[in-house]
């Protein structure tokens, strides 16, 4: 498995054709943002030579790179990938928020699908998945609506009450658990790529029935 800490590793021949439209999109969006190659590379934590190879198609970007470049250029990962997105309503009505159960948690989509950020309302029952450690690229923001939350970030445990929020890099190992018997309700926003709801923040659910 290729290490994300070595962005220039891997065989270009094996990666060729995976994301054919990324190179011209990266260059066009950087120019639209009025950034030089050097400034964009510095903001993304890359060398100018590496970013140049991404823009000329000699290297393919990893997921963390796509997320970083999308933020820097003020766009979405979908646009970086050259996807044509159909017109979407800006407003999501309550009656359109169908609940989805997975791994004991219940989700309601609170934002439009296909965006660079995804928004959810989440109910976390007491005792459900509190031992699952999650680590993945992106950022997460959560806001406690009801109940109390126990949030483990790395080696630190935080207890959040209604009105409290947290915003963190999701490469930091994290665990989420309801502190009260009645569970906890959250607003949850993350910057992961398009994925089924069950894989966005649940982690492994082996042996569990949604």
Image (cartoon, rainbow, N blue to C red):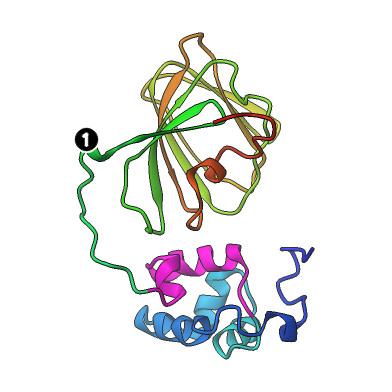
The reply to whether residue 35 is in sight is no
Is residue 204 placed above or below 47 in the rendered structure? above
Principal secondary structure, stretch drawn in magenta: helix
**Where residue 190 sits: x, y (%)?**
46, 47
Image quadrant assignment for residue 38: bottom right
Task: Identify the residue at horizontal 56%, vertical 69% (top origin).
Answer: 44
In the picture, the quarter occupied by the N terminus is: bottom right
The reply to whether residue 17 is in sight is yes
Residue 23 is covered by the magenta coloring: no
Look at mark 1 in the image and give the residue it sits on.
95
Is residue 186 placed above or below 4 in the rendered structure? above
In the picture, the quarter occupied by the C terminus is: top right
Q: Residue furthest top?
A: 181
**Where residue 93 sits: x, y (%)?**
20, 40
Magenta part of the protein: which range? 60-83
Residue 76 is covered by the magenta coloring: yes
Q: Depth check: 31 or 187 in front?
A: 187
Task: Identify the residue at horizontal 32%, vertical 36% (top origin).
Answer: 98
């Amino acid at each position: 498995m290729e290490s994300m800490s070595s962005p220039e590793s891997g065989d270009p021949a094996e990666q060729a054709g995976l994301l054919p439209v990324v190179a011209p999109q990266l260059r066009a969006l950087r120019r639209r943002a009025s950034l030089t190659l050097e400034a964009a590379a510095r903001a993304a934590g890359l060398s100018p030579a590496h970013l140049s190879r991404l823009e000329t198609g000699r290297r393919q970007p990893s997921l963390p790179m796509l997320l970083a470049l999308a933020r820097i250029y003020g766009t979405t990962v979908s646009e970086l990938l050259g996807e044509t997105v159909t017109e979407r309503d800006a407003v999501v009505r309550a009656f359109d928020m169908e609940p989805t159960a997975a791994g004991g948690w219940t989700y309601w989509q609170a934002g439009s699908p296909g965006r660079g950020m995804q928004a959810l309302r989440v109910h976390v029952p007491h005792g459900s998945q509190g031992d699952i450690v999650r680590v993945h690229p992106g950022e997460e923001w959560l806001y406690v609506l009801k109940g109390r939350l126990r949030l483990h970030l790395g080696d630190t445990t935080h207890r959040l009450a209604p009105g409290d929020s947290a915003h963190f890099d999701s490469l930091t190992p994290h665990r989420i658990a309801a502190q009260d018997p009645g569970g906890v309700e959250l607003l949850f926003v993350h910057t992961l790529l398009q994925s089924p709801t069950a894989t966005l923040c649940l982690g492994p659910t082996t042996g569990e029935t949604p």
